[in-house]
Image (tube, rainbow, N blue to C red):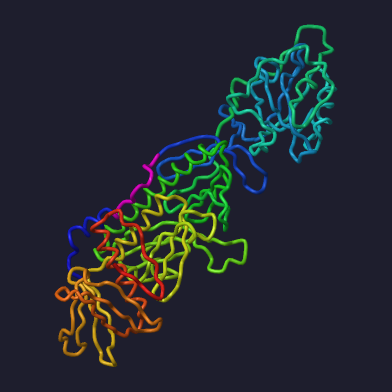
Amino acid sequence: MSALPKSLQQQQQHADRPLSLPVPAWTKSGVVLLHDGKTGSHEVRLKLSKDVLTVQKQDVVCVGGSSVSNERTVTLCRQRVGGFGLSIKGGAEHNVPVVISKIFKDQAADQTGMLFVGDAILQVNGINVVSCTHEELVRILRNAGDEVTLTVGYLKEAPAFLKLPSSEESNCSPIPSSDHSSGTSSPLFDSGLHLNGGSSNSGPSPSSSPVSSRTRWEKQWCDTLSLPLLMARVSRYTPGTDQLRPNAFEVIAVDGISSGVLQCHSMQECYDWYQAISSNTTELTQQNMKMSNKYSPAHDQIVHMGWLYERAPTPDTWQVYRTRFLALKGHHMHLFSCPPVSTRDWEKAERIYNVFEVLCKVLKGGDLQDQKEHCFRVMTSTEDIHYFSVEQASELAVWEKAFQTASFLESITYNCLLKGRPLGLKIDFNTGFTCFDAETKHLIWHYKFAQLKGSSDDGMSRVKFLFQNTDTKLVETKELEFANHMAVLHCIHSFVAAKVALVDPAFVEAQGASKKHALS
């Protein structure tokens, strides 16, 4: 293949990086709700780095001493003011253990240094209370006397409906003594007012057992899942549908491991997280492409690749969409169910098409099939139709530009017939259309691209070209017969699109293919 025109070389160089995509955020952290489909929803902390998203859950860990148990046993002495100095929520009626929901500063529970908001109460004075209702445990603690021994373990996945305070809000002000007389409790409200009743001891308030100087416990965010972002995808849609999750998204690594559904507190927060993660994944994909292209010949460079959704041709189930990985490499379109991570993987594509023989059209308005807005359609010369959707308008623009770049060819020749006579039709980006005798190579006719005024086909094999004679200004008709006439028409469209793109870089309107093709 001959060298590309300078303008096309620049166009391909620009394709090495996506256009109008967000600048990588690199790092970000924050607390969101995780819906894992098993234990409901609970708080997790996300940490985003350049190439990894880490999901963290809170836990209480021993940072001093040699304890390896996840359980702690603590002795509390009821004080005249403030009682045990804690409040509780939850209970068996909600399928969760009773947990400590508040710890009051400088009171009995706080003085131990071993109790934390989110601790599940497992035993009281050696008696298992995991299956107790909220009211039952309140009664046990109220009647436990002035000294009680608690065995606790931190509940890592405390349900969101308990509305436990964050670690920054864990230590609360003391309960006013006038509130201690309340006599009712609820599993979804703090019951500190009911179990911190007055002590029968009239002497000085005894002290709770302090934490050993050698053993120290802390509540920390601990890593539970790390998702590599290379070739990962970020989705705001409910799987298989065109429905956006409310303020939520999901991250799926290349090996299929999922973060679970991550729900933010607001639409803006969700958008910020989505932008930060997707921009980092895009940057990693671009780096991977550059590394691959460094060792590939010029005619086999990766122009663009990434995740998208493909709509089922006749959706008759809940799964209208499925995720696909699309890559434009050289002059070919590769369609995968999962990304290629090795050279051999490129041979495992489910579909491979010549890009210059497909039509890519961005869809708008009435052409859209459902609520997804950013869609495009690819029609192939074999009359396969692929309906794709992406999540952002910027992604759509990049894909359209990539198709224009990948579909460019300097020239291509098709075998054809004229009344049974074998001919060849050469389509050249610079010189236009040349028809010649297949055996003798003698020229039969030649026209430039600017002379092409239109074309039509009979739906089977014949294509009629309309050229304007530069001298007479009359339109001349040339009819040829091809084994695959759609491939020829798609190829001509690609050449014309490339010509227009050179004149007008903002060219975005890809024409659709039908029984008649108007090319201008």
Q: Main secondary structure of the magenta part?
A: loop
Total labels: the figure holds 0
**x 62%, y 47%: residue:** 36
Looking at the image, residue 302 lies above or below residue 198: below
Residue 221 image offset from top left, x and y in percent: 55, 34
Q: The N terminus appears in which quarter of the rendering?
A: bottom left
| 118, 407: nearer the viewer | 407
Residue 160 left/right relative to 14: right
Q: Nearer the viewer, residue 474 or 336?
A: 474
Q: Residue furthest top?
A: 203
Query: Is 119 placed left or right of 460 in the picture?
Result: right
Q: Is residue 148 left or right of residue 5?
A: right
Left or right, 51 with reference to 407: right
425 up-or-down from 224: above or below: below
Residue depicted at x 65% and y 27%: 116
Q: Position of residue 300 (x, y in %)?
A: 28, 65
Q: Position of residue 231 (x, y in %)?
A: 43, 54
186 in magenta: no
Q: Quadrant of residue 317?
A: bottom right
Looking at the rendering, in which quadrant would you find the C terminus? Answer: bottom left
User: Horizontal and vertical percent for residue 366?
Assistant: 49, 60
Would you say residue 17 sits in the magenta stretch? yes
Foreground residue among 500 and 491: 500
494, above or below 267, in the image: below
Compared to 204, does 410 lie above or below?
A: below
Quadrant of the rendered image containing residue 85 = top right
In magenta, the rendered stretch is 15-25
